[in-house]
Amino acid sequence: MMRADAKAAQLLEQSAAEISQAASRHLLATAPDLVRQFGSDVGSIWQQHFDQRVLELAAAMATGESRLFASRVSWSREAMTARGQDDAFIKSTLVSLRYALIEVLHDNLSNDIITVIDNAEQELFDNKCESTESALDPRNPVDNIVLQYLQAILQGNSREAIRIVIDEIDHRLTAKTAILNVLMPAQREIGRLWHLGDVTVAEEHQVTATTQHTMALISQQTKHQTDNGYTAVCASVAGNAHDLGIRAISYLLEMEGWRTIYLGADVPAYDLPAAVEFYDANIIMLSLGLSSQLPKLRTAIDALKQHSPRPQIMVGGNAFAGVTGLWQKIGADGYSPNGEQAIILAKELVIPVNPLN
């Protein structure tokens, strides 16, 4: 098992821009056809790619979890494969990253950093790309609603898409299942399609905006349970612009009688303690999407714990997938892989068990 190395992580973060520039230059020099494929902005595109890889390396070093880097490389491979790049090219991006690390860091380059890259490459080419097939089955009545919802949005009729979902509530769906089993799977499906290059960023944004509106309408039209006296603050950490999952959890908790304070996306770490204190929160629920955001999450958790030991801290998001126990390493009190389990865990962490029940 790899040891955590905070010094190496900090060095990578501080040098990220220089390393990504060097890696991009190396890649363009060794693969000149990229200019034809990506156009005049090719340098900026690949610099952004390598900048993300360096920050993912930093997260792996900070936590001692090489899987954080390997999983993102695998994710990137799937996207590149869908856009016509072969495994040889994908390997060349790792070669360029190694070259840049050596060029920029010199004697300060830790052997463990190179080992993380080597392990990711070995895992990458030992395994085939994961299945990119849809998890939705049109023969399943609820999945069929998901597909109808998406089709209506992508045809430019968001109002019809919303009606499809709302009309099913109290028939085949409850408010909770509409959010968890229709709207959230719809987001996963549009994300899968974007990853494969089958829809544009604009279309993905169109679906997301419609889903936000639909969730708000469902919450507004649903009778909420009696106030249980507990308060949850919900937010996405600094750097995470994707907040739909934590927004859904906020709505679901509210329906079950919680007072929820939804702070939205990209919330700075040092603003969180003041919010927790002002609203007298029992729990704060934090979401992140990428492993590169882990340092920001750790900063947020440290700030919260230094300020007050009272609120429980629960985390979730894609960055935790496949890395067992990562939430404990960064100091959280609990972790949930999905919305349904998040509701259950929030109760377990906060609401005392009545021994008479």
Image (cartoon, rainbow, N blue to C red):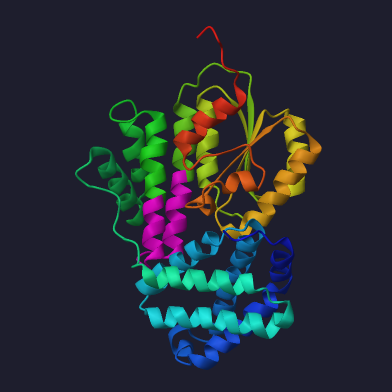
Q: Is residue 300 left or right of residue 254?
A: right
Using the image, determine if residue 228 lies above or below residue 220: above
Residue 119 is situated, as x and y percent measured from the top left of the image, at 50, 69
Majority SS type along the magenta span: helix
Residue range (magenta): 188-211
Figure check: 66 above or below 232:
below
Residue at point 42%, 52% (across, down): 207
Quarter of the image where one finds residue 351 = top right
Does any portion of residue 85 appear in the rendered image?
no
Report the residue that reaches farthest toward the top. Answer: 356
Q: In this view, does 262 lie above or below 27?
A: above
Instruction: Looking at the picture, tell me which residue is in the foreground, 95 or 344.
Output: 95
Taking the magenta stretch, the answer to whether it contains residue 149 is no
Residue drawn where x is 51% and y is 24% of the image: 256
Residue 86 seen anywhere in this rendered image of the structure: yes
**Residue 253 x %, y %:** 53, 29
Q: Residue furthest front?
A: 1
Residue situated in front as seen by the camera: 198 or 137: 137
Horizontally, is 34 left or right of 61 in the view? left
Classify residue 233 by image quadrant: top right
Residue 100 in the figure: left or right of residue 317:
right
In terms of depth relative to the viewer, which is nearer, 50 or 242?
50
Position of the N terminus, as image quadrant, is bottom right
Q: Which of 242 and 31 is in front in this view?
A: 31
How far across and down, in percent of the image, does residue 282 sit?
67, 28
